[in-house]
Image: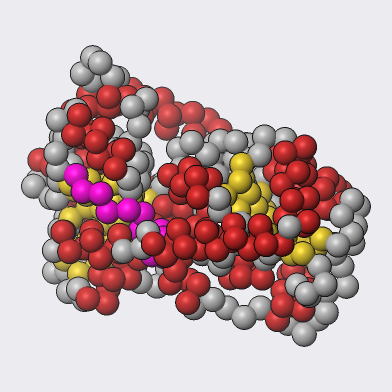
Amino acid sequence: MYNLGIYFMSFLIRLASPFKKKARLIINGHKNVFKLLENKIDKEAKYIWFHVASLGEFEQARPLIEAIKKDRPEYKILLTFFSPSGYEVRYNYPLADIVTYLPFDTKKNAERFLNLTNPQMVIFIKYEFWYNYIHESYLRSIPVYLVSAVFRESQPFFKKIRTPYRNMLSLYTHFFVQDEESHKLLLKHGIQKATVSGDTRIDRVIEIQKQTMNLPVIESFADKDSLVFIAGSSWPADEDIFINYFNSSPKLKLIIAPHEIDESHLIEIEKKLNRPALRYSRLSKTDTVNADCLIIDCFGLLSSIYRYADIGYIGGGFGDGIHNLPEAAVYGIPVIFGPNYSKFREARDLIAIGGGFTIKNKEEFNNIMESFKGEPEMRERAGEAAKNYIFSNSGATNKILKHIF
């Protein structure tokens, strides 16, 4: 059934490729994977293979990669992506010796991939469960680790009737889970090779905060006479809510860093705005921003931009799930997000300690914003709670690497 599902998924992606850019990028990317590996793999080298789904998971892998490159220079790094959203942004990541897409999870592809790469170990991030790659690694006695994992009772691994998915868990060498709930769930189902290590992304955002870039344009825009509201990784459903409030709040300045920066989405945002707005890419470093809204239409700046915020909004909560909460919370600002947050431990924890706030509609968003505007002390307490949470949950990278090595 699993293999049939993989063939069906690959068929659908190929079918959609003439019409959908992401599908087309996947298919085109897969065409060159094995040729690239044949040309680039150093047969004398020892590789550690990291596989991530997309950009968010890459950020969870990154602290481990950086620590290995620093402390274990005898290893080379092979980095694979499933999603174009990750690969197309990080294909030239300098600390990886080889970066490529991962071919579809068929038995033939798994055998060919491992024949070419022969990694010393495999590190998958969070939700990556590719049976044929994992099984083939297991047969070759290659250790396979799952890092920053989160498990829930509703997942197919834990159905009452034992399924192939449950069997897949037995093929991993060790699980490094984010929370105690995941650990207890694994133990309940007979999986003992697990450690509560936390989320490596926490270590990453702390490192970013220490090395944050100065952005003169943003600094000149974020004057002290107005509250600065920064919305990161936003989608149209998020934008409908906060832009509506912004349009009627003259003392609020808005910075939007949308998740998708294609031209059609940027135009859609501009149509919703009733106040002056500019795109970041059209400004020079010395420009003064004579507008109330700044649209960040390029990648790579959001993690530094949050430092200029009084309040942060994290997009995705009206879709599949919120994006990178710690990236904003590390700067000591309260964070707001949509209702689909239950899969994210940091969101639940931040709500519990008063550093995070979830909303379902415009009315709830407006009420929270009015509270923040009217009670600066409340806003500051919330921001401090968010920052303390981030720093008190650091250290996952060291725990994982100490166990592995």
**On-image quarter of the C terminus:** bottom left
**Residue at (33% x, 27% y) in the render:** 153
Q: Nearer the viewer, residue 188 or 116?
A: 188
Q: List x then y, in percent, for residue 132.
A: 23, 36
* Residue 200 part of the magenta segment: yes
Q: Is residue 222 left or right of residue 204?
A: right
Q: List x then y, in percent, for residue 304.
A: 58, 70
Above-or-below relation of 224 to 366? below
Above-or-below relation of 168 to 32? above
Q: Is residue 83 left or right of residue 269?
A: left
Is residue 108 at least partly visible in the picture?
no
**Residue at (81% x, 67% y) in the render:** 226
Above-or-below relation of 393 to 140? below
Q: Nearer the viewer, residue 15 or 191?
A: 191
**Residue at (55% x, 63% y) in the render:** 384
Q: Residue furthest bottom?
A: 286
Q: Is residue 3 left or right of residue 118?
A: right
Q: Nearer the viewer, residue 366 or 212?
A: 366
**On-image quarter of the N terminus:** top left
Q: How is the image coloured?
A: secondary structure
**Residue at (29% x, 42% y) in the render:** 180
* Residue 232 part of the magenta segment: no
Magenta residues span: 194-204
Is residue 403 at least partly visible in the picture?
yes
Q: List x then y, in percent, for residue 347.
A: 50, 46
